[in-house]
Image: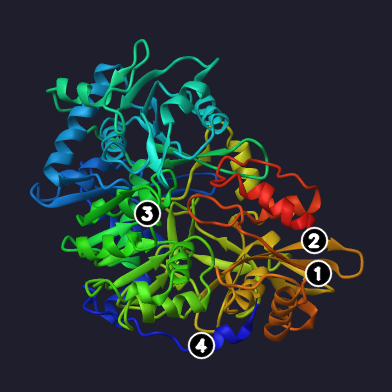
């Protein structure tokens, strides 16, 4: 860890264009001082319930309930309780198609589609798979499931047929809802064809197809058209009264084995956590025009848009496609045209925009933009300051956050307008979460000491189990430090309580007895003007135990060759020390990544070690990166 980063000045919580928190600093401290149980009950009091909670936590990790006996409905909190005339969705597709949906129109469509699902025999607890990109139909399908208590599972639109099959076979849905296709960088991605391939040999569910690209797309025997079904259904399903711990959805996350984990989140527990998360990390209001750039297939989108965002009644920009298509001006055009006030995105997207040059930013009026919040890859201070100064003209508050699919929220960040941050940090644990960094022996680490990140008390939005395999849930998350949830991330708290997450525990390398976080080495590389992106992994070395190897994606005008590789190696030595000198610097055109922008470092390690990518690759967005990286490794 580069400890000089910890000495940067704290950035004021009031450093915003026009946003002010509805709370005073004293009230913020009151929120922070509450016990987790008292805090979550207070948050729940801001939501709508059929039977309001009167109790908090019951049980402990592996077998717990939150708000036992309380009943409510997620769709009511996200749709019904907002003014029907307010704009809910401003949808735009890569090819320029646009739609506008009010809260009233969206609520009506959800209620009718929920009735259609009931008419097809879908009952509480039945599974419904949603295989779509960021289309309005995804909002309708998912909230229809919430409305009647069906358990939905979103399948990422970029998955292969094999990955789709794994998820369908595991969840065994009664209904699958898909679009005929989606667009990605000017290409038509055939979702229905992939679904048909995935279903070969499986019990055939009812298939509903929303024809988004081709209005005359042919349907198979027994398949239903989404829009015809919606139009023909006049009945509106009443919202089901669901218990706070009833399962709401299954979301699959990749692991080191070939079988993905189906994490089960409760519906109302997730709502409570997502609502609070958006409250603090974005300070979102009904007057905001807000853009979450994530894909509906990753949990970031349900947390910060589909559930957490809608629960606050904001107007959501929903974009389907690649934000760099047809060119790097697309995100700026969207921000200017819709008057976007807040964005939730990933550091990778900001680095892409930065790579396109500051001259492009200057062409657009982004004066309404007040806040950029982030999650995903570690945020380097250079990108933090570029976002604040160039994208935001010095007026933006940049709120980096940290969370996981398992936790159901980005549970560490600044409380916007109330608490400070530090460039590159993840803020602090939000109210309701008890986090601690531990040494390998389970004792607490000191401030500034790198260790294993854990959470010591359950919270409503924590995943409750792995679908059909609770033993896997317990062995994966609860066995490393008994009585605690293990995040499997390396982290430290600085002297001011700011959280620094350096990456997965296996991304902390031990070089000749020195523990070095790969994020520190990557930060040294990213500061070089020739570097667009960097990823560092450790490989076995007889002399030093582990040796760092750097993969670097250069900027377009960089002069490749041994001179650049030597210069980048020396950059690490200057910033970190000779002990961290990489064994190799490998210049590549691209690196393997997920759609959410995370670099898949374990794939890079595999390619260095065995020459073959192993484990679950279903979240890999760019399979062409594997042969490209292998070619660069082999020289």
Give the vertical position of 54 relative to 501 (above or below): above
Q: Residue 119 at x, y = what percent?
A: 24, 17
In space, the residues marked 4 and 3 are separated at their CA atoms by 38 Å
Q: Which residue sits at x=20%, y=42%? A: 76
Q: Quadrant of the C terminus?
A: bottom right
Characterize the local packing of mark 4: few (<14), some (14-19) or many (20 or more) Cα atoms within 10 angstroms.
few
In space, the residues marked 1 and 4 are separated at their CA atoms by 30 Å
Helix, strand or loop status at disc 3: loop
Q: Residue 465 at x, y = what percent?
A: 52, 40
Q: Which residue sits at x=60%, y=44%? A: 623
Q: Earlier in the sequence, mark 1 or mark 4?
A: 4
Mark 1 or mark 3: which is in front? 3
Mark 2 or mark 4: which is in front? 2
Characterize the local packing of mark 1: few (<14), some (14-19) or many (20 or more) Cα atoms within 10 angstroms.
some
Judging by the rendered image, the residue that carries numbered circle 1 is 583
In space, the residues marked 1 and 3 are separated at their CA atoms by 39 Å
Q: Earlier in the sequence, mark 1 or mark 3?
A: 3
| Residue 8: image tag | 4
The image quarter in which residue 483 lies? bottom right
The image quarter in which residue 372 lies? bottom left
Camera-nearest residue between 2 and 388:
388
Helix, strand or loop status at disc 4: loop
Judging by the rendered image, the residue that carries numbered circle 2 is 539
Q: Earlier in the sequence, mark 2 or mark 3?
A: 3
Give the vertical position of 450 relative to 630 (above or below): below
Q: Quadrant of the N terminus?
A: bottom right
In space, the residues marked 2 and 4 are separated at their CA atoms by 32 Å
Characterize the local packing of mark 2: few (<14), some (14-19) or many (20 or more) Cα atoms within 10 angstroms.
some
């Amino acid at each position: 860890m580069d400890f000089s980063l910890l000495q940067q000045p704290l950035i004021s919580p009031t450093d915003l264009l026009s946003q002010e928190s509805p709370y005073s600093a004293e009230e913020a401290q009151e929120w922070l001082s509450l016990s987790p149980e008292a805090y979550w009950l207070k948050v729940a009091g801001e939501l709508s319930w059929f039977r309001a909670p009167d109790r908090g936590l019951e049980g402990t990790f592996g077998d717990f309930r939150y708000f036992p006996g309380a009943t409510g409905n997620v769709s009511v909190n996200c749709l019904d309780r907002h003014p029907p005339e307010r704009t809910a969705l401003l949808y735009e597709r890569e090819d320029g198609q646009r739609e506008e949906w009010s809260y009233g129109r969206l609520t009506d469509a959800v209620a009718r589609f929920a009735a259609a699902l009931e008419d097809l025999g879908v009952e509480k607890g039945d599974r419904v798979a949603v295989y779509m990109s960021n289309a309005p139909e995804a909002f309708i399908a998912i909230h229809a499931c919430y409305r009647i208590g069906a358990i939905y599972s979103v399948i990422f639109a970029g998955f292969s047929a094999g990955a789709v099959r794994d998820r369908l076979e595991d969840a065994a849905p009664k209904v699958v809802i898909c679009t005929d296709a989606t667009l990605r960088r000017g290409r038509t991605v055939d979702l229905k064809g992939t679904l048909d391939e995935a279903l070969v040999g499986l019990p055939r569910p009812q298939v509903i197809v929303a024809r988004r690209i081709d209005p005359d797309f042919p349907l198979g025997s027994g398949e239903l058209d989404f829009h015809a079904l919606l139009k023909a259904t006049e009945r509106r399903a009443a919202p089901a009264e669901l218990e706070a711990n009833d399962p709401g959805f299954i979301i699959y996350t990749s692991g080191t084995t070939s079988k993905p984990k189906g994490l089960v989140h409760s519906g109302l527990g997730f709502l409570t956590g997502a609502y609070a998360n958006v409250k603090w990390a974005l300070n979102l209001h009904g007057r905001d025009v807000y853009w979450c750039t994530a894909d509906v297939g990753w949990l970031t989108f349900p947390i910060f848009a589909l559930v957490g965002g809608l629960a606050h009644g904001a107007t959501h920009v929903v974009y389907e496609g690649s934000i760099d298509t047809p060119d790097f001006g697309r995100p700026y055009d969207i921000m200017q045209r819709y008057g976007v006030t807040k964005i939730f995105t990933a550091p990778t997207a900001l680095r892409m925009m930065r790579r396109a040059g500051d001259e492009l930013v200057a062409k657009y009026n982004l004066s309404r933009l007040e806040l950029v919040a982030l999650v995903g890859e570690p945020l380097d201070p250079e990108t933090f300051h570029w976002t604040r100064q160039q994208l935001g003209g010095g007026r933006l508050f940049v709120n980096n956050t940290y969370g996981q699919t398992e936790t159901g929220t980005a549970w560490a960040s600044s409380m916007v307008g109330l608490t400070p941050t530090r460039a590159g940090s993840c803020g602090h644990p939000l109210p309701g979460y008890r986090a601690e960094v531990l040494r390998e022996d389970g004792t607490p680490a000191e401030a500034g000491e790198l260790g294993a990140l854990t959470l010591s008390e359950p919270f409503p939005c924590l995943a409750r189990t792995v679908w059909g395999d609770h033993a896997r849930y317990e062995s994966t998350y609860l066995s490393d430090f008994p009585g605690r949830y293990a995040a499997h991330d390396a982290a430290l708290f600085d002297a001011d309580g700011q959280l620094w997450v350096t990456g997965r525990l296996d991304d902390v390398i031990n070089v000749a007895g020195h523990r070095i976080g790969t994020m520190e080495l990557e930060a040294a590389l990213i500061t070089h003007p020739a570097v667009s992106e960097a990823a560092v992994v450790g490989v076995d070395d007889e002399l030093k135990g582990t040796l760092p190897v750097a993969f670097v994606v250069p900027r377009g005008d960089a002069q490749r060759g041994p001179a650049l590789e030597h210069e980048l190696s020396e950059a690490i030595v200057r910033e970190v020390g000779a002990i961290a000198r990489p064994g190799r610097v490998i210049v590549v055109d691209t690196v393997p990544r997920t759609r959410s922008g995370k670099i898949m470092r374990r794939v890079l390690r595999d390619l260095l070690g065995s020459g073959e990518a192993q484990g679950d690759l279903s979240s890999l967005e760019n399979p062409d990166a594997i042969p490209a990286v292998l070619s660069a490794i082999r020289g």
